[in-house]
Each structure stands twice: as structure tokens, then as C-alpha cells.
């Protein structure tokens, strides 16, 4: 187990912004500290309350599997258009499958990326005749893309376990009295995994970033994520100067650079709701890469059961810094069924 000194060193590493003179101090959460979950909980709590983004180490996903997922993604996106379009999300009522360049949109602007969406196939919470995200995934042809489905399913299964460990750490960091506090809400997690390809940035210098942004030239526009935690796997060598986050209580955008072996993770909207805003769902955006080969990224969205109702935890409402003495029992967020929230968001994501 790393020493206290080494943990302090890890937590103090910095990611330097290339967009300004500021630097981002991105916290590190190390799940390899398996003999002391409370230490993990404390470091996660610090990361989620101060910045909402962190590097995740000790996740236990083998390097060979991570590399295989990225290679499978790149092979798919480099395939003939007809092969990709054969599993177009236009064929799916539940937003599963391939999306060509500029089909995704954020805040009314078309995003400069291709995507392939895969979801849990859980039927929990499904109501006949009610539109929802329930459905079957569309997979590339096994004869053309051997091992694609098995690789992705293996990765998704392992990532669910990583998410489970983060939720135990959350409960401990929030001092909720039981490491399994959140477990009933994740009996059948409705996870989502995206494989994304960002083509090379057309404006190649950072000086021109503002022009690209003003012209809608973003890989993904400004947004927060919908669920609990997002865990991002990406081609590290192609990821410099791509992900930007907006500093809390500021309008300044700064880059988050890759850290070898780490996943970049962030808090999403439902976790902000559960904690009554104690944990921050931080706005972020993605610029297309400078690298000539573009960039493959694989975010995994760890989310609760589709029918889980998420509401601010009463004891956290009492602790919320936003609460004044006269409103100490008032929450900042209304209760919401996760599936309703997800469908409302995803149903506005595409331009078919």
C-alpha cells in the first residue's frame, strides 16, 4: 500500500492548462488502497466537493483490455461508411448504435464527432407504450469486426464493478454510516458506454481556439453529464489539449491533460442531486484533437437502475453550504426518476 507521503504526492500532481496561465490541480483517487476504504472515501470526497473532476488510478482494468477497447473503437471508425451505417442509431427507438459526424448536438450546435452508443439491456422500469431508453444494442458484424462485442461487453462488466467501488467510497466520504448506502439504487445499473471518434481539428493552433468555439467547431459542446460518475478511457497520445473544464465559480476554461494509466472521471447530475449540490457536476467540453489521426475516446457512464428515484439525502440537505439557518430543511433539487431524466436528455441529443 502506498505510504501517506506517496499519497500526498499523488494528490498534489498538477495538470497544466494550455489555454491560459492558470494550472488545474486535478485530484487523484487511488482505488488500490483496498485495505483502507475510508482513505479512498476521503480523497474522493475532497475531489467531488472541490472540483468535480479527478484522475482515477488503481481501477484494476488491465492495460491489455484498455488498449483492446481503444483499438476496437479505432478499427470500427476507420471502416467503410456503409458498414458503420448498417447499425445506425436511426434504426433504434432507444438511441443505440452509430451516429455519423454532426448527428449529435449540444445546446443546438452540431458536435464534431462520430459515436457508437451502447446501453444496459435491462428491462427494469419498462412500461409498455411509454417511450424509454429500453432496447437491444446494435453490434458491428462479427465477421468484419471479430471480438468487438466480446471485448466491449467484458470492459463494460468490469467498469460496473469500478463504479460499485466508487459508490462505496462516496458513502464513506459523505459519512452516511453504511458503505452500502447506495447499493439498493444500483441493483440493475442502467449504464451507458460510448465509443467516440473526434477528427483532427481544422484550426491547428491554440491561438485560434476562440475562433473555432465561436464558429461551433467543438467535438462536444459545453455540458454536464446526466448520471452519477463518468469514467473516460482515451488514447493518451492523442488527448493533449482536448478536454476542457470550467473552473468552479469562474468563467475560465482550462485543459485537463491525460495522466498515464489513469482514467479521467467526473461527477454527473444525479450525484449532484443526491448530495444537494455538495458534489459538483462540473461543465466541460471537448475540442477536436490536433493529432492527424484524430482521437478515440470511450466514456463509461455509471448510472443507477432505470427506475431509481433520486432525491437529496436529508442529512446532506442539512449540511449543504447553500442552506441558511432559515431554510435548513429545503433541498436545492427536486426528486426525479433516473430513467425519466435520461430519456428527456437523450431524446434531444440527435439530428437524424
Image (tube, rainbow, N blue to C red):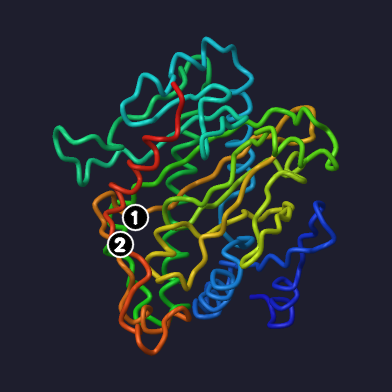
Quarter residue 51 falls in: bottom right
User: How far across and down, in percent of the image, does residue 110 sit?
Assistant: 56, 30
User: How far across and down, in percent of the image, does residue 220 sit?
Assistant: 60, 39
User: How far across and down, in percent of the image, does residue 102 sit?
Assistant: 56, 25
Q: Is residue 249 depicted above or below 92 in this figure?
A: below
Residue at the location (28% across, 62% down)?
335
User: How far across and down, in percent of the image, does residue 96 sit?
Assistant: 39, 30
Cα–Cα gap, marks 2 and 1: 9 Å
Quarter residue 312 falls in: bottom left
Which residue reaches farthest left? 128
Residue located beneath label 2 in the image? 310
Q: Is residue 298 left or right of residue 14?
A: left
Residue at the location (62% across, 24% down)?
75
Q: Residues within 10 Å of mark 1 (few under 14, many from 20)?
A: many
Residue at the location (74% across, 29% down)?
200
Which residue reaches farthest bottom? 325
Q: Which of marks 2 and 1 is in front?
A: 2
Q: Quadrant of the C terminus?
A: top left
Q: Which disc, if any, is residue 336?
A: none
Q: Is residue 173 depicted above or below 107 in this figure?
A: below
Residue located beneath label 1 in the image? 304
Q: Residues within 10 Å of mark 2 (few under 14, many from 20)?
A: some
Who comes first in sequence, dot 2 or dot 1? 1
Residue at the location (31% across, 52% down)?
338
Q: Are marks 2 and 1 in contact (CB under 8 Å)?
A: yes
Amino acid at each position: 500500500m502506498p505510504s501517506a507521503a506517496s499519497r500526498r504526492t499523488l494528490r498534489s500532481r498538477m495538470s497544466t492548462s494550455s489555454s491560459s496561465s492558470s494550472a488545474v490541480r486535478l485530484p487523484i483517487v487511488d482505488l488500490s488502497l483496498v485495505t483502507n476504504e475510508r482513505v479512498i472515501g476521503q480523497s474522493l470526497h475532497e475531489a467531488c466537493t472541490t472540483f468535480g473532476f479527478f484522475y482515477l488510478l488503481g481501477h484494476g482494468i488491465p492495460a491489455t483490455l484498455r488498449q483492446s477497447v481503444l483499438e476496437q473503437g479505432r478499427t470500427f471508425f476507420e471502416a467503410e461508411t456503409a458498414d458503420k451505417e448498417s447499425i445506425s442509431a436511426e434504426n433504434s427507438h432507444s438511441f443505440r448504435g452509430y451516429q455519423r459526424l454532426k448527428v449529435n448536438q449540444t445546446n443546438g450546435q452540431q458536435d464534431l464527432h462520430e459515436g457508437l452508443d451502447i446501453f444496459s439491456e435491462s428491462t427494469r422500469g419498462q412500461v409498455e407504450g411509454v417511450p424509454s431508453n429500453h432496447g437491444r444494442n446494435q453490434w458491428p458484424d462479427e465477421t468484419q469486426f471479430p471480438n468487438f462485442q466480446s471485448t466491449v461487453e467484458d470492459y463494460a462488466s468490469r467498469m460496473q464493478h469500478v463504479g460499485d467501488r466508487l459508490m462505496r467510497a462516496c458513502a464513506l466520504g459523505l459519512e452516511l454510516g453504511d458503505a452500502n448506502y447506495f447499493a439498493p439504487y444500483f441493483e440493475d445499473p442502467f449504464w451507458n458506454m460510448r465509443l467516440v471518434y473526434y477528427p483532427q481539428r481544422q484550426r491547428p493552433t491554440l491561438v485560434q481556439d476562440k475562433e473555432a468555439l465561436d464558429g461551433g467547431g467543438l467535438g462536444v459542446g459545453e455540458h454536464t453529464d446526466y448520471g452519477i460518475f463518468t469514467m473516460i478511457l482515451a488514447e493518451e497520445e492523442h488527448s493533449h489539449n482536448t478536454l476542457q473544464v470550467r473552473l468552479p465559480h469562474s468563467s475560465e476554461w482550462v485543459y485537463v491533460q491525460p495522466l498515464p494509466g489513469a482514467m479521467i472521471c467526473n461527477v454527473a447530475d444525479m450525484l449532484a442531486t443526491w448530495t444537494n449540490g455538495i458534489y459538483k457536476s462540473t461543465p466541460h467540453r471537448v475540442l477536436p484533437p490536433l493529432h492527424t489521426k484524430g482521437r478515440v475516446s470511450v466514456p463509461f457512464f455509471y448510472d443507477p437502475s432505470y427506475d431509481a428515484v433520486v432525491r437529496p439525502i436529508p442529512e446532506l440537505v442539512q449540511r449543504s453550504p447553500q442552506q441558511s439557518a432559515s431554510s435548513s430543511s429545503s433541498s436545492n433539487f427536486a426528486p426525479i426518476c433516473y430513467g425519466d431524466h435520461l430519456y428527456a436528455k437523450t431524446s434531444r441529443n440527435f439530428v437524424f
